[in-house]
Every structure is written in structure tokens, then in C-alpha cells.
């Protein structure tokens, strides 16, 4: 046993050595082909062809790039606080980061999925998973803002998420860590894993109009690790496929102990069937606790609601919902081709890529061509479901996307390449080095029924010598390929934010034509809005002070405030009166232990400040809004606790003799 362990570790060490040192291609320094520069050059004033929405990994955010230029447009705050926008710092956005366990102002954002209609991307919403604290966010692509975040109960490490069905009926969440269910004792020995730890996959329904998510049902499953997933489409619509590893049910040293079995599984879930059972009132309602946070564009305010119920179907009690397909060597990527006929499983340690046939799976299920069961779930015979294997594709297959012309493209982590192969005969057609060790790859629309098949981008954590050194950590990067011809052509490299995992992309006009330019101030329903300067005011209620302040180029109203006392809870409610595109104003007050806030035209946002010393505190606009942006500033007089200075506020009331003292001083200096 011990010898086995040592041998396994030696093999893993050798593999890692190879992956780190053994694969630098000869021409890595000068590897673009032909007229690459002109293909990525977007002249000044011209727009990119595609929006590329990229996961930010451990930054917790989502970034927006243009393709083919690789220019970074925006970082959308999602799960992490963001001082640039005030996300998670303002009173309005704090509820978005609330969970059943309180404020969790960070997450690890891995996968993205665009909403779809009939299996084609439709440009309405972008879903994003939180991998650490199990959550799913929905980003509204009209505003490029996070509109909703929902927490997932009975889960830990929400990795196989947020993939969707072909009309965005459901977005799924599969747990990476099996754990005791939320309504079971949590204080149990870890070595009772096999008895006490369970896996789940959750189906969240999406309201077709508002996009709002709701946990429709959860499937209770054996204690394995769910990794990735994709929905069936076309003929396989109604099914969902999840890769899983650790069918060994190990709870320690997984790199060895979860690599014992020759095959783990791709789990096929008949979600239409599960939906029927739910409609029939089957399943068990469990008492749980999870946060559901929604941002409202009329009140410009988020609310966080703690939900208390979930509906759980124990998969082993419903024999026609879940089937397991054996899949070699700890499968990672689980990708369904555009026709919906094939499911590709990528075993991280496998030397081949198995491609499964949906049609064969249906036949095998019909005649019960099973190879026993796993924890009460039927296991289909590998050969009965297999369409075929891609032989010798490379080392370390991870993820596959499709070009819509019958070809698949798979990243090879260990051999640092992208391999193009044909779905019909599983022949390898082309391979191209990447620098280095690609994780995910993405073709615009490449996991939908209608890929746009012109570009491919590989995302990489390891760039080694590709960029100027920046201390101990080097940048992470994307590499853009032209896949319009028979051979892949490398066009460009560019650094990316955070650690990129999965990404999505779509033609630019699908979003740009709907993009919100301002918020209509007449429709501003914020309870502390000041509609016009004449409504700006300062109101004391006990030790709470509400400042209804407006912003317009280039002043605040009011900009002189007196009567604030040490220990007061001061709420600055800033309304931006502008109704022009791209004229935000910022607000920062000295010593506030929070970020600035950035207020869009027509919007109201609130900064809370508790002054802790007697002072004249300054505040100013942080966003360069006009030629007189630097003049956009003001003062607050903070008096001692118990002082009787009354509240007063003003704008433009220069009661000192204008400028005289200052002028005198300056004359005297020479
Ligand atoms: Cu307003 Cu700078």
C-alpha cells in the first residue's frame, strides 16, 4: 500500500516536472503567422467585432475585452468589493454580498455562461459562479452590472456552475466538495465521509422576463466531487451532463487517493423527468438558509432576503433521473457539441478523449445495458454509450469547444497545445502550441447551438517568459487564434485580469445596441433622492444625519455643512443630476474607512461616515468630470459630541469678504 502511494507520487511529480519544464516549443518567441498584426488591429475610433466576457478567477470579478484587439474595456464587480465603483462599500450595494453567514466580500469566479434562446446566445444576461462560497450571480448586459446573487444551500465549492439549458429555463450548480447536508449534524469526524458526506446538483429556474433566479430543486447524490457540466441541446435538450471525480470518496490526499479508479463518471441527468416529479409534489422540503440578493434599478438599491426552504429529490429513489457514464481518469471538461449528439469528456490524466453518443445512451438506457450501479445509481456500459475515442490527442485534455463546422478544439494542459479534431471520425486535424499550459478555451458561441467560429482564445495561468517580469508573480494571459482556415493561426497574446478560467463572447451589436446610457432621473425611486438642487438638504434624527446631496458639473449641493458632531452616523446620499452619457461623479470624504462612491447619471448612492474627531473635513469629486473637476469640493464642520452648533448647509454663500485675506497674504510674501 505504502509502496503504491510512493510510486503514484513519483509519477505525479514526473508529470508535473514535464508540465513545467518539458514543453517549451522552439519558436515560442516568434510564433505568429502571416499578417497577424493587421487581423487584430482595430484602428482608433473603430469598434471591436466581439465582446469577450472573461472570468476573473480569484479577483472575484468579471472582465470585458474586445476581440480581436484584446483591449480591456471594463471590470464588472461581482463577488468582490471594488473601490473603483464603490461596489460592496455603498449602503445600496452592501446587501449584494450578504450570505446566510453574513458579509462575504470576495469569491473565486470561475465560469461564465450567456443566456440563450433556442440554444443560441441572446445577449440578455451573463451568469457567473462563485466557487468558494457557493453562489451564482446574474449580470445584466444592458448595464454591465451585477443584478442578482443567489447562494446555494447544501453545497460547498460551487464549481460545475453556472451552465444553462437551451432556453435559459435553468442554471445549474454542482458541488465540488461533498459535505454533510445543511439540515444534518455538521460536527462529525472527517473520516465519516462515506457515511455523512453527500453531493448535490441544484437546478435554479430563471424567470424569462426579469431573469430572477429561484432554486427549483436539488438532487441529492453520492459523496463525489462535481467538476463541470453542460446542458444537452437539440435532440439531447432535457438532459444535463456533469463530470465528476473522486468516485473513490477520498477525503485526504486526493491527488493520489482520488486517482485510484480507472474511470470516474459523467453523470447524465434527465431534468425534464425531475421537473415532472417536482410537479407531482415528489421530493422533500428541507429547512435551510441561503441569501437571495437582488439589485433594483429604480430604487438603485439591493435587498437581501434569507430564504429558508429547498426541495430535495434523492436521486436513488427516482430510478429514471440519473445515469452514470464511465469516463476515464478524473474527467474535467464536459462539453456538448452544437448538434447535441455528442458529449465530450476530458480526463485530466487520460491519453485519449472519449466522445459519447446521446443516441447510444438512450438505447442503452432503454434496454438497461447497465454495468451494475454506483451508490444506487445505474452505471451504463462504457462501450454501449461510446461514439469513439480521439486517439493520441496530446497530454492532459481539459476543455473542448466547437466551431459549428463539425470540428472540436481541446486544450492540452500538460503538452501545452490546442488540438483540433473532427467529431464525425475523431481524426486529429491540427495542433498548435500555446504558451503555456492552457486551461479553458473559448470560441464565441462555442458551447451553444450556433458558434460564431472565427476566433478561438486560450486562457493561461502560466506565462513564464512571455512578458516583462513583474516581480515574483507574472501576468496571466489570453492567446487569440484565427480558426477560420484549416490550420489554426496564432494572432496575439494579451494579459488578463485575475486568473482567467472560462469565458464567453458574442457579436458586439447584440449587446451594444441595448446598452443603457443614463438612468432616467424622473424614474429614480430611491428613498433619499434629491430631485434637483432645491431639494438638497441635511436632516438630523437623533444621532443620525441624512445628507441629501446633489452633483452636477462642477459642484455639490450643499458644499458647506455645519452642525455634524463626533460620533454622528452620517449618511451622504448622492444624487447625480446629469442626464448625459458617461458623466459619472465621484464622492470621497476624508478618513472614511470605506471607498469613494461613483454615481452614474440619474442615480443615487449612499456613503456612511462616522466622524471620530473634531475637524474640518473635506470632500471632493473623484471622477474627472469637467475642466473644473478640481473645484468640485466642499467642507464639513465636525464639532465635539454634545456641542450645540445647529445643522446648517449652504452652497455659494461666500460670507467672508471674497478672497481678501488670501490676496493680502500672497501680496505680502514677496
Ligand atoms: Cu464631478 Cu469631477
Image (cartoon, rainbow, N blue to C red):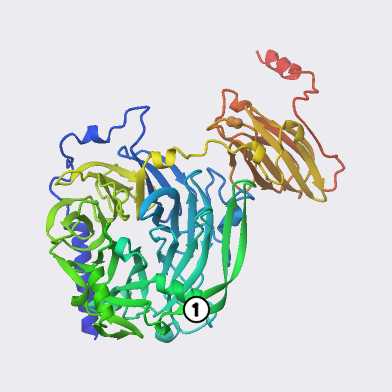
Q: Nearer the viewer, residue 77 or 414?
A: 77
Q: Position of residue 99 (x, y in %)?
A: 57, 63
- For this view, does 207 lie left or right of residue 270? right
Where residue 565 sits, quadrant-wise, is: top right
Q: Nearer the viewer, residue 641 or 523?
A: 523
Q: Position of residue 660 (x, y in %)?
A: 75, 16
The residue that appears at 52% across and 43% down in the rendered structure is 84
- For this view, does 158 lie left or right of residue 490? right
Helix, strand or loop at mark 1: loop
Where residue 118 sits, quadrant-wise, is: bottom left
Q: Quadrant of ligand 1?
A: top right
- For this view, does 12 lie left or right of residue 564? left
Which residue in the rendered view is the most extreme toward the right?
A: 644
Q: Position of residue 516 (x, y in %)?
A: 52, 39
Where residue 372 sits, quadrant-wise, is: bottom left
- In the rendered image, which residue does mark 1 sit on? 181
The residue that appears at 64% across and 37% down in the rendered structure is 521
Amino acid at each position: 500500500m505504502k509502496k503504491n502511494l510512493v510510486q503514484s507520487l513519483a509519477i505525479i511529480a514526473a508529470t508535473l516536472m514535464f508540465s513545467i519544464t518539458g514543453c517549451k516549443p522552439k519558436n515560442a518567441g516568434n510564433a505568429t503567422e502571416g499578417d497577424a498584426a493587421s487581423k487584430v488591429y482595430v484602428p482608433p475610433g473603430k469598434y471591436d467585432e466581439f465582446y469577450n466576457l472573461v472570468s476573473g478567477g480569484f479577483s472575484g470579478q468579471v472582465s470585458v475585452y474586445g476581440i480581436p484587439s484584446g483591449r480591456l474595456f471594463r471590470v464588472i464587480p461581482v463577488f468582490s468589493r471594488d473601490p473603483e465603483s464603490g461596489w460592496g462599500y455603498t449602503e445600496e450595494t452592501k446587501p449584494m454580498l450578504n450570505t446566510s453567514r453574513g458579509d462575504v466580500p470576495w469569491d473565486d469566479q470561475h465560469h461564465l455562461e450567456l443566456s440563450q434562446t433556442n440554444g443560441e446566445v441572446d445577449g440578455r444576461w451573463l451568469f457567473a459562479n462563485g466557487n468558494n462560497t457557493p453562489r451564482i450571480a446574474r449580470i445584466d448586459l444592458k448595464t454591465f452590472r451585477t443584478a442578482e446573487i443567489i447562494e446555494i444551500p447544501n453545497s460547498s465549492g460551487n464549481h460545475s456552475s453556472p451552465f444553462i439549458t437551451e432556453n435559459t429555463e435553468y442554471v445549474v450548480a454542482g458541488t465540488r466538495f461533498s459535505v454533510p447536508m445543511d439540515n444534518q449534524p455538521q460536527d462529525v469526524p472527517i473520516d465519516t465521509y462515506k457515511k455523512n458526506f453527500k453531493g448535490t446538483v441544484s437546478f435554479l429556474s430563471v424567470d424569462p422576463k426579469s431573469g430572477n433566479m429561484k432554486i427549483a430543486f436539488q438532487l441529492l447524490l453520492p459523496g463525489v466531487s462535481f467538476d463541470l457540466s453542460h446542458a444537452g441541446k437539440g435532440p439531447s435538450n432535457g438532459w444535463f451532463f456533469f463530470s465528476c471525480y473522486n468516485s473513490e470518496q477520498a477525503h485526504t490526499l486526493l491527488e493520489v487517493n482520488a486517482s485510484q479508479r480507472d474511470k470516474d463518471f459523467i453523470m447524465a441527468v434527465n431534468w425534464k423527468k425531475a421537473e415532472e416529479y417536482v410537479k407531482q409534489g415528489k421530493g422533500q422540503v428541507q429547512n435551510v438558509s441561503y441569501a437571495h440578493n437582488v439589485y433594483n434599478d429604480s430604487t438603485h438599491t439591493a435587498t437581501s432576503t434569507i430564504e429558508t426552504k429547498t426541495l430535495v429529490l434523492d436521486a436513488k429513489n427516482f430510478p429514471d433521473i440519473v445515469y452514470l457514464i464511465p469516463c476515464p481518469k478524473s474527467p474535467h471538461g464536459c462539453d456538448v457539441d452544437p448538434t447535441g449528439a455528442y458529449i465530450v469528456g476530458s480526463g485530466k490524466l487520460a491519453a485519449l478523449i472519449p466522445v459519447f453518443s446521446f443516441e447510444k445512451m438512450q438505447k442503452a438506457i432503454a434496454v438497461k445495458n447497465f454495468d451494475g450501479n454506483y451508490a444506487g445509481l445505474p452505471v451504463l456500459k462504457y462501450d454501449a454509450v461510446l461514439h469513439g475515442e480521439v486517439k493520441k490527442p496530446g497530454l492532459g485534455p481539459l476543455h473542448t469547444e466547437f466551431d459549428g463546422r463539425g470540428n472540436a478544439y481541446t486544450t492540452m494542459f500538460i503538452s501545452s497545445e490546442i488540438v483540433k479534431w473532427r467529431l464525425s471520425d475523431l481524426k486529429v486535424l491540427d495542433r498548435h502550441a500555446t504558451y503555456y499550459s492552457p486551461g479553458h478555451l473559448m470560441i464565441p458561441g462555442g458551447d451553444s447551438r450556433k458558434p460564431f467560429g472565427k476566433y478561438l482564445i486560450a486562457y493561461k495561468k502560466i506565462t513564464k517568459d512571455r512578458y516583462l517580469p513583474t516581480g515574483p508573480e507574472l501576468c496571466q494571459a489570453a492567446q487569440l487564434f484565427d480558426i477560420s482556415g484549416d490550420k489554426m493561426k496564432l494572432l496575439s497574446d494579451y494579459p488578463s485580469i485575475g486568473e482567467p478560467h472560462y469565458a464567453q463572447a458574442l457579436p458586439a451589436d447584440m449587446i451594444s445596441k441595448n446598452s443603457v446610457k443614463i438612468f432616467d432621473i424622473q424614474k429614480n425611486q430611491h428613498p433619499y433622492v434629491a430631485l434637483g438642487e432645491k431639494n438638497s438638504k441635511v436632516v438630523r434624527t437623533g444621532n443620525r444625519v441624512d445628507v441629501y446631496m446633489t452633483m452636477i458639473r462642477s459642484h455639490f449641493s450643499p458644499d458647506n455643512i455645519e452642525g455634524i458632531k463626533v460620533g454622528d452616523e452620517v449618511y451622504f446620499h448622492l444624487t447625480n443630476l446629469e442626464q448625459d452619457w458617461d458623466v459619472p461623479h465621484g464622492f470621497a470624504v476624508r478618513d472614511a474607512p470605506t471607498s469613494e462612491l461613483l454615481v452614474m447619471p440619474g442615480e443615487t448612492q449612499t456613503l456612511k461616515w462616522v466622524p471620530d474627531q473634531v475637524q474640518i473635513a473635506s470632500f471632493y469629486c473623484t471622477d474627472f468630470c469637467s475642466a473644473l473637476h478640481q473645484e468640485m469640493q466642499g467642507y464639513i464642520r465636525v464639532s465635539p459630541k454634545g456641542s450645540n452648533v445647529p445643522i446648517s448647509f449652504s452652497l455659494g454663500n461666500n460670507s467672508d469678504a471674497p478672497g481678501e485675506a488670501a490676496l493680502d497674504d500672497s501680496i505680502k510674501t514677496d
